[in-house]
Image (spheres, helix red, strand yellow):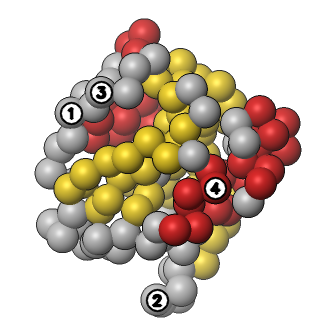
Amino acid sequence: MPDVVAGILINEDRIGLFKRSHLVAGDPGRWHCITGYLPAGTDPLDHARVEIGEETGLGGPDVLLVRRGACLDLPCPDDDVVWRVHPFLFHATHSGLSLNWEHDEYRWVLPAELIELDTVDWLLDVLLALGPSASRAHGLARL
C-alpha cells in the first residue's frame, strides 16, 4: 500500500486549492491539496512540510501546523490501489505562493466554493479526516 501525505493549507477563512499540472501523472487539471509520496522511513509531518515547501515556496514560520488527522486508507477509483493518506491541516501566514511545475494555478476558496470546482475524488475525505472541530472552526461543516 503506497503512503502519501496530504497538506491542507488555510489562510483566514479560505482553503488553498491547487490545479494539478498536465505534467503530473495523477488527476491533471483537477483541484487538490498539496500531496506527495511518503518515502519509507520518513516522518509524515516532516515530509508534508517538505512537499509544501517544494510546491508552494512556503516554509518554516510561514506554515503552522493546526492539526494532524487520522490516517485514511482510500481506494483509487481508477485501479485496485489503496492509498494510505496522512492528512495535515496547516495555517499559511500569507496567501502569496510560488508554485512549482506540479501545479498550473492556485486559489484560496471559501469552503462553500469547493462544490463548484473539479476536485480530486478524495479531497473531501482528507478534509473530513481532520476532525469535526477543525471542520467547524474553518467553515468545512457546511459541506
| Element marked by disc 4 | helix
In this rendering, the label closer to the viewer, 1 or 2 = 1
Which numbered disc, 2 or 3, marks the residue that appears first in the sequence?
A: 2
> Does 63 appear above or below 47?
above
**How far separated are the C-alphas under marks 2 and 3?**
34 Å
Number of the front mark, 4 or 2: 4
**Is residue 66 visible in this depiction of the protein?**
yes
Q: Which residue is mark 2?
A: 78
Residue that numbered label 4 is attached to: 112
Q: Kindly identify the amino acid type of the residue bearing the numbered disc 1.
A: Ser
Badge nearest the viewer, 2 or 3? 3
Q: In the image, residue 58 lies at what x, y percent? A: 32, 24
Q: Position of residue 121 (x, y in %)?
A: 54, 74
Question: The N terminus lies in which quarter of the figure?
Answer: bottom right
Query: Which residue is located at x 43 percent, y 50 percent?
Result: 17
Q: From the top left corner, tell me how far across and down residue 88 is, in percent.
A: 59, 39
User: How far apart are the alpha carbons under marks 3 and 1?
Assistant: 7 Å
Of circles 3 and 1, the one toward us is 3
Q: Is residue 72 rendered to the left or right of residue 48?
A: right
Quadrant showing the C terminus: bottom right
The dot on residue 98 is: 1
Residue 96, which numbered label? 3
Amino acid of disc 4: Ala
- Relative to 25, 17 lies left or right: right
The nearer-to-camera label among 3 and 4 is: 4
Where residue 14 sits, quadrant-wise, is top right
